[in-house]
Image (cartoon, helix red, strand yellow):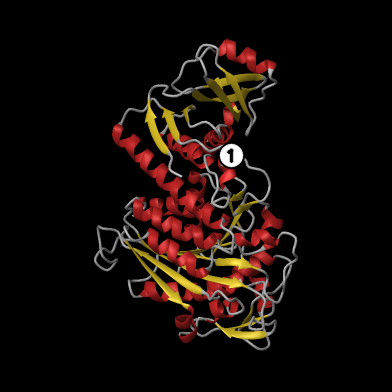
Amino acid sequence: MSISLSISNRIATNNLVVGLSRDGQDLKIESGNVQIDQRFWLDALEKYGARGANDEVIKLVDPKRSNSLIVFTGLGDAKKVTNETIRRAAGSAARALFGAEQADFALPHKSANDLSAICEGALLGSYLFMDFFSKVAAEKKSPLLQINVISRFTDSELVNKVIKRSLVIFEQTTMVRDLINTPPSHLTPESFCLRITQLCKDLPIKAQTFKSDYLLKNGYGGIIGVGKGSANPPAMLHLSYEPKISKSSKSNPNLKRYAFVGKGITFDTGGLALKPAQGMEAMKSDMSGAAAVVAATIAIAKLNLPIAIDAWAPLAENMVSDNATRPSDVIKIYGGKTVEVLNPDAEGRLVLADAIVKATEVAEKSGGLDGLVDVATLTGAQVVALGTRTSAVMTNNEDFSDLFLTAADISGEQFWPMPLPEELRASLDSPTADIANIGERMGGMLVAGLFLKEFVKPETPWLHLDIAGPAYNEKTAHGYTPVGGTGIAVRSLITLAELAVSHN
């Protein structure tokens, strides 16, 4: 699906989107650079019981323009409108316009960030996954194909930059959502690698796939241990992006280098710790972290950001068979540390451990890492602690965490810092191996973070992002977030790279 985006100073379509907020008890129409008859429309909206609430959308026929609609999208409290409020309002309107081919968005904006929020929200709200519907389903409503944002900004350089960045974010978020929504019968470790490698062919990204034979021979016990129960062999995908301004960080001491590591379980049955049937269908989303890190890397390359990125996606299916890893088996992670697998359903941390060690090893050849970020749908405990819309951040470096949280705030993605209490580490002790893969049940999200910390060098700034709940929306669509894969973390990782560059 291809969507065009333009920014102009005039109405170009028959569908006009404007904002509706509430200032105390009064409704307030916020239409940016477009003048409309406030008294007429406020009277009409009062009759419809409009509240100007977030996610509220009211579509009314415009009597002054034939075959035209005005779409009022809720902004909430007029005194508390933020970038994210605008982004969600634009997304809600775009979803309400499924079936229309084009629309103008006239929403309030005072800065380039506000303008970007309108563009991103309208684009991200115009998402629909139709890959597996029959031809009969072609009659279903389709999303917007042309989006025009009406703005007072006339600086062509600024406008072009906003358009380019917004389209890149939309394209890569769409890719992540598509990968997550693809059924596991059509997305395996091998097909994941092939799909991403193909996308990187025309970009300054080197893509390398480590197949199962290589992983077995070279001691990647975590990935092999998780994936050996499946007929679809495991793999690990490595993307390496070097900006055009420099071939290596050695030739440019100011060039920062990050590693992104994403959990890539293309389907998770729980292995021999079999999950309940109810809800297991959502386990096709257990590769959301891998999808996010490769998409962010592709986006960074398309934006030509002057930062080096290595993305690692350890991929496996966690299945049940006579070859599957058993509870109490001991495996050896890449680099030599041994793990007693007490629970085969705590598998994500095992594949991540392999990749984290490898990412650190490769980076040391280029002078080390300025930051390592792992992204994973890791624990159900994350959902218990923070719900389905807020992800967790754990770290060994508060400065790096603060930078990321700033990036998340700018991007509009909800992340919350969580601790790594030392007293929980003892629960991971094993009588037969260096460490066990599970420990104290209470605080399970934090215990998982402590496990991963064991494989990170203390001097490497590291973030662990647990996106278990926000990665897959099983409820109703809201704002620019559809049902199914959401694409969480992509925007924050891109913004993190941009901030890292600006802080050089």
- Which quadrant holds residue 246? bottom left
Q: Position of residue 182 (x, y in %)?
A: 56, 57
The residue most toward the front is: 136
Q: Is residue 478 left or right of residue 211?
A: right
Q: Position of residue 108 (x, y in %)?
A: 49, 27
Vertical placement of residue 171 versus 334, above or below: above
Q: Residues within 10 Å of mark 1 (few under 14, many from 20)?
A: few
Please report the residue visible at 64 percent of the width from the left and 65 percent of the height from the top. 446
| Quadrant of the drawing holding the C terminus | bottom left
Disc 1 residue type? Answer: Lys
Element type at marker 1?
loop
Q: Determine which residue is flagged by label 1.
A: 140
Q: Report whether residue 457 is seen.
A: no
294 vs 187, nearest the viewer: 187
Q: Is residue 260 left or right of residue 154?
A: right
Q: Report whether residue 146 is seen.
A: yes
180 vs 380, nearest the viewer: 180
Q: Position of residue 96 (x, y in %)?
A: 59, 33
Vertical placement of residue 27 versus 400, above or below: above
Vertical placement of residue 430 versus 143, above or below: below
- Which quadrant holds residue 324? bottom right
Please report the residue visible at 62 percent of the width from the left and 59 percent of the height from the top. 468
Q: Position of residue 105 (x, y in %)?
A: 48, 28
